[in-house]
Amino acid sequence: MGSATIRHHLLSVLVENKAGVLARVANLFSRRGYNIFSLAVAPTDDERFSRITICVDVESAPLEQVVKQLDKLVNVVEITELDPTEAIEAELMLITLEADRESRSQVIQLVDVFDGRIVDVSPDSLTIMLAGTPSDLDHFEDLVGPYGIAGLQRTGRVALHKLDRSRGRLHTVSGIAASSGKASIK
Amino acid sequence: MQLTGAQALIKSLETEGVEVIFGLPGGAILPVYDPILDSSIRHILVRHEQGAGHAAEGYAQVTGRPGVAMVTSGPGATNIVTPLCNAYMDSTPLVVITGQVATGSIGTDAFQECDTTGITMSATKHNWLVSSADDIPRVIREAFHVATTGRPGPVLVDLPKDVSNSMMEWYWPSEIDLPGYRPPAGGDSASIREAARLISEASRPVIYAGGGVLKSRATAALAKLVEMTGIPVVTTLMARGSFPDNHPRCLGMPGMHGNYTAVTAIQRSDLLIAIGSRFDDRVTGKVAAFAPDAKVIHIDIDPAELGKVRRAEVPIAGDCRLVLEELITVLEETARQASPASRGDNPLAQWHAEIARWQARYPLTYDRQPPDGVLKPQYVVECIRDSVDDDTILVAGVGQHQMWASQYWRFNKPNTWVNSGGLGTMGFAVPAAIGAKVAKPEATVWAIDGDGCFQMTAQELITASAEGIPVKIAILNNAYLGMVRQWQEMFYAERYSEVYLSPDLPDYVRWAEAMGCVGFRVEAPEEVSSVIEKANEIDDRPVVIDFRTDVFEKVYPMVPAGASNDDIIVDPAHGEGGA
């Protein structure tokens, strides 16, 4: 699981739940030329805030700059950086596969192996819901590709830090960011 | 007390201490223009919204207080995007109020509708679309807070017409609730002690002072640091005047058109103390070759500037004034503890002597007695400089004239220099001069402008005449877009493409007179001083002087774009192989 060379980092960004905040974050990435692999956003248990999980291409810009620039957005309350080797990442996929009488049982076997669920059925296709690590989903996608993918949607990853090693590894980007008061250690 | 949203807006601005609004009304902002009639705030009616924005910038740059501009929706808002970008680049506090179509019409492509908050998102520190009149006092309080604290910058408040027209119960928020906005104050003490240690060990230190010194009102602290340590200071284009040019430790401006000594002192330094400066490409040249032997102490209130361009050995996120004051205290303690003989009387004597040799060998220079008797632009700057006192405010546009103004003026007091640094906005000078003069009516305000720049925003001289704002504009008219012409001459094999403007189309004197100004024309060097004297005596109207200057004059020294600062090209008058 996980690719050999890590080109991405995960940022868990707590933002005020206000109109236009997502646009501000997206605009910043575009304006500064930072690449995003994926982005997931949803309200938190406190309705005043939302959490944006951003998977950043760290080859497009130094992560420290990305975090510091994000931190300057007035609506960004807190940024937590998650090292992918120290985080639990998960993603959801909906995929519609061509599965006629001949191939259907093979497809269902693969779905079982990956703990997926069949959520819709038609005579010659299946829609499957699959949750897992992003690399699980990549793997599944590769395996079922030959059967014919009629439709596919992935949510982008969300993440939490691993419990057993959370203290030492989850860190602010630098002492400088910490002195600005926003990036914080969780 | 029940107020309309429009009344609440004006009352909020009054509560924030606003004295002047630069603006131009239109449909969506109409409700707000009614209570202005009853307000103590002076409104200055500009002729183009860009002028409102730059005037507000001029006001802010000389006072340190936020400039306020107000315009209507759609084209009014888009016309003020350039000043917003300009203010964002130069960290100038601005509060811009824009009208917006009624909330029910937003998104319908209504008349004069545009996505103002979307368009200005990356040109402001923050912006707000007000959705209820009840929010107006809170948003205005937040807007001024964000514009003026931390690293200052422009903000924008977009106000739909129905919100202006609806009723609210007046209040003034006692607190600001911005959970994601906590700018740093003082710096980290351990880092400041480490900075003091590096300073005490350095043998070739240079202070690289940027605009943040002025923004944080750190000029007195900077002066004290220099008195204590003897460290020479370069002042960037945005920091001219933050340390007096007449001080023996002042080396003047570094960068692409900086003087030889300022550029070379940085290159040879073993410790660079960057204070409120951001390692702009016009200062560093080729970054990899910039100050190659220097350790870097970088003090800035914006943590994102630390390490953005050049890694600092000691990064300090904090307000420049607070950090310098603590640094001075630490240095004083260290000095008390050290044995008096430990470093001799002047540990930097050798460094000072080396710098003095560069200053003697490569002063700023130009041909003071050109064979054809042509009028040199630098001479005009020197004559104006010598005709006025140190409190005079100098404003410039962007281009060759701006560089000559920065090079040849003597800035001995802070906040006497107003120009467009980061964005390089041609046409900045005339409206910014108006804003500066409104802010400091007792000061003489001169603008050095180019003929290309002047044509972009000259219409604001109508504003100046109508409002009784007697600014003085010196056009260094070389009939060209001079800086572009210089690059085409030097880097495009003298292939001049679309840079010729003509010396007499338009006729600047008649144009000035048509706008209610006094117009003069000067063609010979011997006329310069007497006409400047006449201009200095006029204080009831704006003055425009059309100086017909040498078409071929170039700005020297010059570090070509992308080159190392070691490859500085000095004025040919210094002889071959200068550097």
Image (cartoon, grey):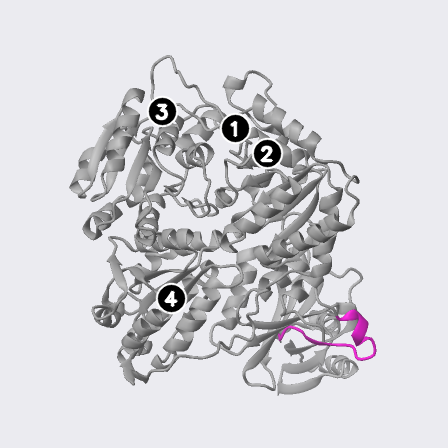
Callout 1 touching callout 2 (CB < 8 Å): yes
* Marks 4, 2: nearer the viewer: 2
The amino acid pointed to by label 4 is: Asp
- Quadrant where the N terminus of chain B sits is bottom left
For marks 4 and 2 on the same chain, the one whose residue lies earlier in the sequence: 4
- Describe the element under mark 1 as helix, strand or loop: loop
Residue B167 visible in this rendered orientation of the protein: yes
Q: Chain of mark 2?
A: B
Q: Which residue is mark 4?
A: B115
Which mark is drawn over residue B420?
Answer: none
Q: Which residue is mark 1?
A: B557
The percent position of residue B556, horizontal first and vertical second, equals 49, 27
For marks 4 and 3 on the same chain, the one whose residue lies earlier in the sequence: 4
The percent position of residue B256, horizontal first and vertical second, equals 53, 35
In the image, B170 versus B79, the foreground residue is: B170
Boundaries of the magenta span: A154-170
For marks 1 and 2 on the same chain, the one whose residue lies earlier in the sequence: 2
Q: Quadrant of residue B358?
A: top right
Q: Residue at x 39, y 43 (%)?
A: B391
Which mark is drawn over residue B263?
Answer: 2
**Crowding near the residue tagged with mark 3, few <14, some 14–19, many ≥20 C-alpha atoms within 10 Å:** some
Q: Are marks 1 and 2 on the same chain?
A: yes
Q: Are marks 3 and 1 on the same chain?
A: yes
Q: Are marks 2 and 3 on the same chain?
A: yes
Q: Which residue is mark 3?
A: B551
